[in-house]
Each structure stands twice: as structure tokens, then as C-alpha cells.
Image: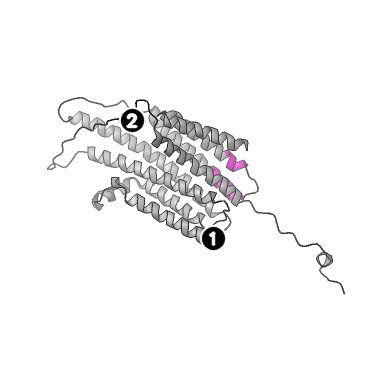
Amino acid sequence: MRLVLLYAAVAGLAVAASAVSATEVSLRCAAAASAVLAWQAATGARTAAPAVRWALAGGCALFAAAALVRQSAYSEEPTDVGWFGYGPPGTAELTAMRDQTGWWLGRELAAAGVQLGALVLCAGAVYCLPRARRRARAVVTVAAAALLIAAVGADRRLGTDPWEVAPALREIWPGVLAVVAGLTGLVLAGRRADHRWLVVAGSALVAVQAAMTLSDLTVLWFTWSSLVGPTGDAFLEPGIAISVATGEPGGLELGEALRTAVTLAGPGLLVHGALRAGTPGPAPQRPAGPAAGNGTGPG
């Protein structure tokens, strides 16, 4: 119970930090919360199968590592290449913008690769849980997986031209495989013993987290590819993107806070539900009586 309260407190700090745009603090707290969850998975319920416990512990440890990779991107961020002028940027400015975007893309790909390992381990932990025939739950999980696939496919940032999507998917393959691993864990959860739906809910949130990572990778890749030099007969004139704040100064970033909450709630629900489902129940007791003592009845 103490580890649960500690995890909830640190996760709450991460959500609060993301709400006030303290991204580095939020990522550090998220890494600490995942480390606490990994310790709980390894030592919390020794009655669960070792394969379940250690797969969950390894997955949470990799979630913590992914948060630290993203945090290092902010602490080692290169110098901003902002510019001001009345015309389009020159070659030097475009090169600097392209290099900075490529640097961010590389860091996000590294974090997505670590996250892929975490999702594979979590799906393996779900696979090792005792099976149960839950037809309604299986239908729900398959429908949820199909809905998430449709949401990913309908993402406007993926574009509609297959000649543009195919190169992007080849470059951001860690994000694509992470979504596949998340969907696999979600579908498997529908056929596993889970009386309180914690495994299903946790697997669904973990899959949503993978989909959000893929969306981020897609945006970064298309931004980087648009800054790569065009062909000789192409015409390219970069414009100026202007962001107008619509909220009050110093307002809360509720979208980022919700995203952080989803990122931390998924593994938390999955660990608690899997440890409960992986713990075998008490063996049924045989009725006491003369016939149960020596296997023979009266007479």
C-alpha cells in the first residue's frame, strides 16, 4: 500500500508539472513514478507467476528510461535558430532549422525504441496471465483495437498520398511497432482472467500512449522532410508560422496534463490488474465427512 501511495503522489506531481509547462520536472517525476511501479511489480505480489512479475518490472523500468531519454532532449537542447526578417529565410537558416528538427526527431525515435521494448514486455506479461473465457470482453477489446487503428489511420497528419506515407513509416518504424505491440496486449487482455477490468483498461491506455508517440513522430518526420532540400526543378518558398495564444497568460496546459495522466495511468492499472489476475486463488476444499477421510462409505 505504501508503494501505491508513493506512486500516486509522484504521478500526481508529474501531471501537475505538465499542467504548468514544467516539462523537464514532469518527465523526471514520470521516470521516478515508473521506477516505483517497477519495484512494486517485482516485489509486490510474490504469489503471481515470476514471468508476469519480471516482465512487468522490466516494462516499467523501460518506461522510466524512455522518460529520461525525452528529458535529456530538453536538457541538451541545441541553441534556438530563431530568425527575423521580411523575406523567406536563407539557406543557412533553413539548414539550421533542418538540423534542429532532425536532432529532435532522433531523440524521439530513441525514446520510441525504448518504449517499444516496454510495450513488448507488457504484452508478454499479459500473455502469461491465466486464460479465461470472456467472450463479451474479447469482443470489447477487439472493437477497441479496431477503433484505435481507425483513429491512427484517420490522423490528418499522416496525409493521404501513399507515396508520402510509405517513406515516413519506414523511418518511424519504432513508433509503428510500438502501436502494434500495444494493440496486441489489448487484444490478449480480453482473453485473460481479469475480474475488475484493470488489465483491459491499462492495456487500452498503454496502446493509446503508443498511438500518441506515433503521432508525434509523424509530425516531426514531415516537418524535417519539408526542410530537406527540394529537387532542382522544384519550387519551395518557406513561410512564417504564427501562433496566437487564445487563453489567459499563465494558463494551465490541460492537454499536456491529460496526456501525462494517460501515460502514467496505463502502466499503473496494468501492473495492479496483472498482479491480481496472476495470483492464483485458494484451492477448493473437499467436504469433510466419513467418506472424505478414507475414500470409503459406511456399510
Task: Tell me which amino acid carries mark 2.
Answer: Gly
Q: Position of residue 170 (x, y in %)?
A: 32, 48
* Position of the N terminus by quadrant: top right
Q: Main secondary structure of the magenta part?
A: helix
Q: Which residues are magenta?
A: 39-58
The residue carrying pointer 2 sits among few (fewer than 14), some (14 to 19) or many (20 or more) residues within 10 Å by Cα, namely few
Mark 1 lies on residue: 134
Q: Residue at x 38, y 42 (%)?
A: 213
Q: Which mark is residue 48?
A: none
Residue found 36% across the figure and 45% down from its top = 214
| Marks 2, 1: nearer the viewer | 2
Can I make out residue 137 in this image?
Answer: yes
Residue carrying label 2: 247
- How many numbered marks have been drawn onto this rendered protein structure? 2
Q: Residue furthest bottom?
A: 299
Q: What's under tag 1, amino acid-wise? A: Arg
x and y percentages locating residue 74 in the rendered image: 38, 29
Judge whether residue 46 is colored magenta. yes
